[in-house]
Amino acid sequence: MERVVIVTGANSGIGLALCERLLSEDSQLRLCLACRNMQRAKAAHSALLTSHPDAHVDLLHLDVGSVRSVLDAAQEVKARYSRVDFLYLNAGIMPNPQVDLKAFFKGLFSRNIINMFATAEGLLTQQDRLNSDGLQEVFATNLFGHFLLIRELEPLLCQAAHTSRIVWTSSSNARRSAFSIEDIQHRQGTEPYSSSKYASDMLSLVLNRHKNNQGLFSSAICPGLVMTNLTYGILPSFFWTLIMPFMYLIRIFTNTFTLTPYNGAEALHWLFGQKPESLDPRAKYHSLTSGLGINYTQPQQMDIDDEMSDILYEKLLELEKEVRRKLREENADTHQLTE
Ligand SMILES: NC(=O)c1ccc[n+]([C@@H]2O[C@H](COP(=O)([O-])OP(=O)(O)OC[C@H]3O[C@@H](n4cnc5c(N)ncnc54)[C@H](OP(=O)(O)O)[C@@H]3O)[C@@H](O)[C@H]2O)c1
């Protein structure tokens, strides 16, 4: 039977590279590119069909940072497919990143250089803002929109006779110290990206606790440091090009500089071939590339507290109720106005 795979943020970078790799692995897939920018999505669609002319590739409009768009897209998925085998939650943003240049140059000539590039710890802050749903944009995009999508697709993801998988593209920038359970949207801080990725790690773990018995399994990955639109937003592409020989050199000593989207998609692709029962729910699966350019996947334990992840889950369910109520009220107002 053909497997249905949905990839959010599939129109560029790691998401698009994953789609290429999945089609090379299984030409019988039904692959759904769930994208916000449909012009880029159409270009990605054409590129995939050029390399895989017989592939079944669908397009779906999904702005994961908009509640309405998520609900509409989920309706569309339910109309199109009777089940979902893999849901890759890959779309992500890091808006207005600010690099602490002093810390960067200090780190460049220190023993901490590898960790600095691998985790961006102490180096990166972002300016977040409220979106039209009144949610913090980074939280809404990287976490909550995906959470809502899972909730909406539960009938297709939680089927007793059948196993379904969720895979989160997390990051090694996900840090416990950047997350506060009192402020899950990270309204107060300056590291919304790190906070949202840490929250996605927790959510992955808690989903396993709640949903494994319903046939749904969740995993988190880190793609390593990859040159994509996201990294070109942190420092201009010419700068990355300038330091690239240096990066290849450092790769001899570390393995987290995957650098290309193809390499970065390694763990996402590897998980596609694994039995969910064989995976460790407390591990994050890292895409790694050796100095010789050989790709592999390695699990690393996540620093997660069970109690805190349960509270996060409850808070997300509460927020879901709230946004649904708000939407119903808005719909009722519009209905009254049109009468
Ligand atoms: N690059 C790295 O070094 C690195 C490291 C760790 C983790 N990651 C994670 O990897 C994932 C993929 O990022 P990337 O590096 O491949 O960067 P990218 O090329 O910028 O890809 C991000 C994708 O997410 C999509 N997206 C953003 N906001 C969206 C929204 N509201 N609704 C739907 N789609 C949306 C973008 O689509 P649009 O065309 O609509 O913008 C794009 O397709 C992200 O979750 C990122 O946090 C990347």
Image: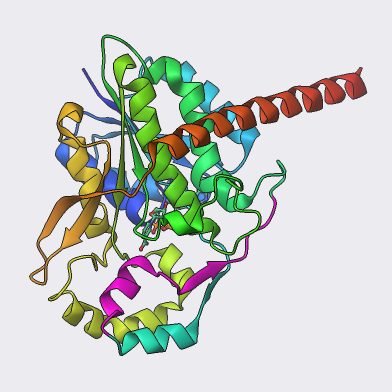
Q: In this image, 189 relative to 151: left or right?
A: right
Residue at 43 percent across and 43 percent down: it is 200
Residue 122: tell me if it is visible.
Answer: yes
Residue at 29 percent across and 44 percent down: it is 19
Q: In this image, 34 relative to 208: left or right?
A: right
The quarter in which the N terminus is drawn is top left
Judge whether 221 appears above or below 248 on screen.
above
**Residue 179 percent across, percent down from the top left:** 51, 53
In this rendering, the count of numbered labels is 0
Return the residue nearer the eye: 163 or 236: 163
**Residue 151 percent across, percent down from the top left:** 50, 24
Judge whether 281 appears above or below 41 on screen.
above
The quarter in which the C terminus is drawn is top right
**Residue 52 percent across, percent down from the top left:** 23, 42
Return the residue nearer the eye: 40 or 279: 279
Q: In this image, 62 relative to 12: left or right?
A: right
Q: Hey, which residue is sitting farthest top in the picture?
A: 161
In the figure, residue 87 lies in which quadrant? top left
Which contiguous range is marked in magenta?
A: 111-130
Residue 52: tell me if it is visible.
Answer: no
Residue at 14 percent across and 31 percent down: it is 278
In the figure, residue 294 lies in which quadrant? bottom left
Return the residue nearer the eye: 238 or 167: 167
Would you say residue 55 sits in the magenta stretch? Answer: no
Judge whether 48 appears above or below 110 on screen.
above
Judge whether 337 appears above or below 50 on screen.
above
**Residue 59 percent across, percent down from the top left:** 44, 36
